[in-house]
Image (spheres, helix red, strand yellow):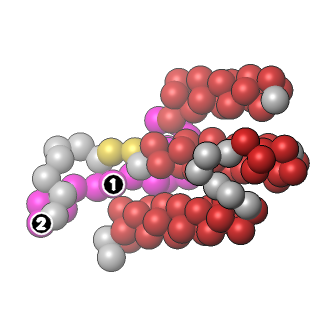
Amino acid sequence: MIIYFFLLILINILFVFFHKQISSFINVYDVPDKERKFHKNKTPITGGSLVLINLLIYSFYVFINSENYFKSSLIFFDIIDFNLFLIIFISIFLLGFFDDRFTL
């Protein structure tokens, strides 16, 4: 448990300090088009990626400790509920990411 916590803290700290370099490296920016997007400068769209990375690391922890996790969970009653949550969350993330990237 403590390993996952420190791993998440480390990833979050690195991501916060280097999010502009990460956006530049993978070229993910929201560019204003003056029709729907009225901001002045291109904006990195990596914030949702950080939430997704945190959720995936947390889900790895849940899958490893699933027999103990679901006994004390107040939100998810079994692995099916958790998998459904992951599928819905990843779908919404991808829809938002592709909307920003390709202007759907």
Give the left or right position of residue 57, taking residue 42 as reference: right
Q: Position of residue 56 (x, y in %)?
A: 68, 50
In the rendered image, which quarter is residue 58 located in? top right
Q: How would you rate the neighbour count of disc 1 (Cα within 10 Å): few for under 14, some for 14-19, many for 20 or more?
A: many
Residue 31 included in the magenta stretch of the image = yes
Residue displayed at 64% across by 55% down: 76
In the image, residue 45 above or below residue 88 = above
Q: Which residue is mark 1?
A: 30
Residue position for label 2: 35
Question: Who's the residue at 12% across and 60% down the image?
Answer: 34
Quadrant the C terminus occupies: bottom left
Which mark identifies residue 50?
A: none
Q: Residue at left 51%, top 35%?
A: 19
Percent position of residue 50, x then y: 55, 42
Left-right relation of 2 to 34: right
Q: Is residue 92 magenta?
A: no
**Amino acid type at mark 2:** Glu
Judging from the image, what secondary structure is the residue with disc 1 in?
A: strand
Stretch of the chain drawn in magenta: 20-35
The amino acid at mark 1 is: Asp
Alpha carbon separation for disc pair 1 and 2? 13 Å
